[in-house]
Image: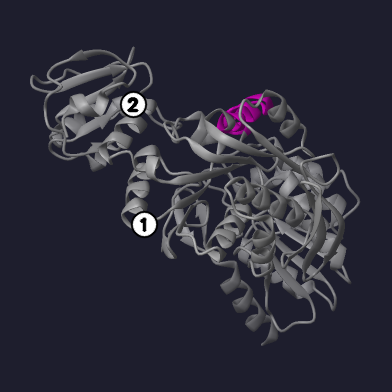
Amino acid sequence: MKLSSLIEGLNVTRISGNTEIEISDICYDSRKATKGSVFVCIVGYETDGHKYIDKALMSGVAALIVQEGSELPRIPDGVTVVYSDNTRKMLAGMAASFFGHPEKNLKIIGVTGTNGKTTVTTLIKSILEFEEKSVALIGTNANIINGRVLPTERTTPESYELYELFAEMVKEGVEYVIMEVSSHSLYLDRVYGIEFLVGAFTNLTQDHLDFHKTMENYKEAKGMLFDVSESSCINVDDAAGMEYVQSCKCPVITYGVDNDAGMRASDIKISARGVIFNVSYEGKSYKVRLGIPGKFSVYNALTALSCVVTAGISIERAIEALTFAKGVMGRCETVYTKTDYTVIIDYAHTPDGLENIISTVREFCEGRVITLFGCGGDRDRTKRPIMGRVAATLSDFCVVTSDNPRTENPEAIIEDIMAGIKEADCGYAVIENRREAIKYALSMAERGDCIILAGKGHETYQIIGKEKNHFDEREVIEECLKELNS
């Protein structure tokens, strides 16, 4: 494809060189640069693509897309340079053209919010598949095309990989795509150029302040989804949701439990086996059953129902589909141990997520609630004491350990957490090694107790330094129980 076709209609400020050259591929990582490709220089969170221009040129790239005002090395003759005021939008727009605008042939449902995105998107997928629709999913756990599972690096892929996925989906006859849309992807233009059939909001609680700096910035980033959605589904029990409804320019279905909403749940019954509740919608009442426990499961079900109804699925069929829906790996996942106590793995890594899972387990736990958790390194430090306070206030006993310390000192992370733990009257133990911490929690459990292993969820690794080490808590539990029993 000619470079002129790739950049047509995009935010180009000036050009140096010939744009009628043929481009073989697009790349934004110099390590993937190939002869005849165009290298898009992106100013990233940790580094700046402009620093790698020389490396890309050595690989034979034919053209560069650079940010206005950036410092550039000497560019050899014959290499075209296209200047832009936003190279991230350039990458997305060029990728869309390169892959033939596959997004225009897909019905895309996007879900944003701090918690619940993975479960909600999975529930929507279950409902659409129940209706025998061809469905793909993009999210934290995996990317799935018609049941085929592909690995994923982040919640929402970079725009090039995203449009590449879309192209593959179109080739395989996919009709609906359900996406987790992170605040990072909205702010960093990873989803630039996509018009969502439905944009949904679950909730907003503290997270990612290492990136967004303030909750106001975080909220604004999430709200960008509704500027590019044909219709929206918004939780009005959340203060941010109420603000989105007031500013939203597209049609909105509101949902909630505590506040008046277009789709509202009532008569909620929660057990270890799941939730049963009534939902009122357009003057009628329906009974909903979902085999995932916790009040948050009611909100997740409401989000999914409002999305599929907006997309044209009957609410009766959607509710029937939820009856057969399964839980998500690492989300309130019960690990079968043949013990007289319960072990639950959950991805909770925010204050709100931790509060939700502990409160849910508290509703059916016959003994003590023992919560094991840590906090990720190189991430928002301000939430650490808050999570400590939440866990210590709601649990009977806490085991504070490592999560993914990354390049931070694990002891320093734990020290931040302990500031909150010590504010509450709760027994606790500090064991930095996560495997040893799990073994300790299992050793102290008694009949009727519930152990929550929070933070890792679906992850089967632990990041220490910059190394990703295999660490599957299901395997660790089995190994520790064998050691304890012997």
Q: State the residue lying farthest toward the left.
A: 77
Q: Mark 2 = which residue?
A: 90
Q: Percent position (x, y) of residue 233?
A: 66, 40
**Direction from residue 271 to residue 150 in the image, left or right:** left
The residue type indicated by label 2 comes to Met
Instruction: Please tell me which residue is depicted at 13% across the width and 35% down the height of the picture.
Output: 36
The tag earlier along the polypeptide, 2 or 1, is: 2
Instruction: Please tell me whether the stretch drawn in magenta is mainly helix, strand or loop.
Output: helix
Q: Quadrant of the N terminus?
A: top left
* Residue toward you, 392 or 290: 290
* Residue 405 seen in the figure: yes
Instruction: Please tell me which residue is depicted at 30% across the width and 25% down the height of the picture.
Output: 50
Magenta segment: does it hold 206?
Answer: no
Q: Is residue 465 placed above or below 173 in the rendered structure?
A: above
Question: Do the numbered discs 2 and 1 sit on residues whose CB atoms are within 8 Å?
Answer: no
Q: Percent position (x, y) of residue 384?
A: 71, 42
Q: State the residue lying farthest toward the bottom.
A: 486
SS for dot 1: loop
Viewer-nearest of discs 2 and 1: 1
Callout 2: few (<14), some (14-19), or many (20+) C-alpha neighbours within 10 Å?
A: many
Q: State the residue lying farthest toward the right.
A: 425
Q: Quadrant of the C terminus?
A: bottom right
Name the image quarter holding residue 85: top left
Span shown in magenta: 209-225
Q: CA distance from mark 2 to mark 1?
A: 28 Å
Label for residue 173?
A: 1
* Residue 456 seen in the figure: no
